[in-house]
Image (cartoon, helix red, strand yellow):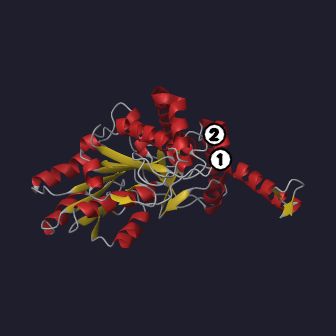
Amino acid sequence: MEESSIGVPSLSLGDRQKLDDLYQRLESERQRFIGYPCSAEFDYSPLYRFLGFPINNIGDPFVPSNYHLNTHEFECEVLEFFRGLCHAPPDGFWGYVTHGGTEGNMYGIYLGREMLPDGMVYYSEDTHYSVSKILRLLHVRNLMIKSLPDGRMDLEDFRETLKIHRDVPPIIFANIGTTMKGAADDLEGIRAILADLAIARHYIHVDAALSGMILPFVEAPEPFDFSCGADSLSISGHKMIGCPFPCGVVLARKANVDRTARNIEYIGTLDTTLAGSRNGDSALFLWYAIRALGLEGWRRRVRQCLTVAEYAVKRLRDEAAVQAWRHRNSITVVFPRPSMDIISRWQLAVHHQWSHLITVPHVTQEVVDRFVADLRADVGNGSAGSPT
């Protein structure tokens, strides 16, 4: 690294070229980024000036700390926004901005374990792959429940498994939008089974990583939030909202969190989160995105994404003869796994015989048309994947 005339570190010409090459590669790849639920439609340039500060949201966002270079005030406004969307109790909720969905899910399972130390975690086979890792890290007893072909938890298998372990309080990990198929587990059906089996001690965590920013803005959402029995809930920020770095929020019932809180003299605040130091820029960026669009703006954006999802299903069926489908209120469009050339070129997620595209805000009808054209050409060359 060379020193400039004023003593400020300066990159060599070769290193600057390396950065330029990276930028060009990322810019090119963004044009065909449709397989993962991360929106690339955002502009946070008004916030770039804040990157000159070592912002750290260490500790509880609702409690002052000795580290004043934070964005806790903005974090609390973000949490209040999500509290309203998810119908959490105004005087009985808590939360924080996380580093992403995995941390939010870990926090939910952690709270469930603290509330029910003798509990058993139940989750479906379509649950995100990180959850099995979380369960190993937390050393929680667990059982995997079968999934239906469309990705939802098989409630008959859930009922029969609960019957066998009725003496163990259940901690239910519910998916509201599964990773591969966008399926929503039947939260009302789960609660009905718990009531029917007279299981009073239970805990429900909801993984709404993508759908948590969709369902609050549709007319007939699937049950997913605190009004439907959730005890904690995780939503990603870099997915539907979009952000340059992974982030998210986790919400929980405050009474449960209070049982885990510890006062830490070193930072002069409560230790209630999983992480010590936390990215204060995440809270600021989410606040900006929420405030810039507003509720009606997000409603319009969600409606547009759902329209493009339906358009993609129709185009894939009519123009490429691909048996595409999606769940109601889902922007995840599922179809048979195509060739490796298509998977690589369009950065598609795959699992067994399935693939999908996700119509987050930057995936427009024009992008869908380009993908369908590539897929048709691929099928014409005889290199498409196996049909269902």
- Residue flagged by tag 2: what amino acid is it? Leu
Q: What residue is pinned by disc 1? A: 51
Residue 360 visible at all: no
Local crowd size for mark 1, using a 10 Å CA cut-off: few (<14), some (14–19), many (≥20) = few
Looking at the image, is 27 positioned above or below residue 388?
Answer: above
Q: Residue furthest top?
A: 296
Front residue of 1 and 267: 267
Q: Residue furthest right?
A: 5
Tell me, yes or no, whether the two marked residues, 1 and 2, touch with CB atoms within 8 Å: yes
Q: What residue is pinned by disc 2? A: 47
- Residue flagged by tag 1: what amino acid is it? Leu
Local crowd size for mark 2, using a 10 Å CA cut-off: few (<14), some (14–19), many (≥20) = few
Image point 43% across, 52% down: which residue?
181
Count the labels in the image.
2
Looking at the image, is 261 positioned above or below residue 364?
Answer: below
Res 259 quadrant in image: bottom left
Res 91 quadrant in image: top left
Q: Tell me the CA gap for discs 1 and 2.
A: 8 Å
Q: Residue 23, position in %: x, y?
A: 75, 52
Q: Say left or right for 263 vs 294.
A: left
Image point 31% across, 51% down: which residue?
232
Check disc 1 and report its element: helix, strand or loop: helix
Looking at the image, is 363 positioned above or below residue 198?
Answer: above
Q: Say left or right for 222 vs 156.
A: right
Q: Residue 314, position in %: x, y?
A: 51, 39
Front residue of 320 and 209: 209
Check disc 2 and report its element: helix, strand or loop: helix
Image point 22% across, 66% down: which residue?
119
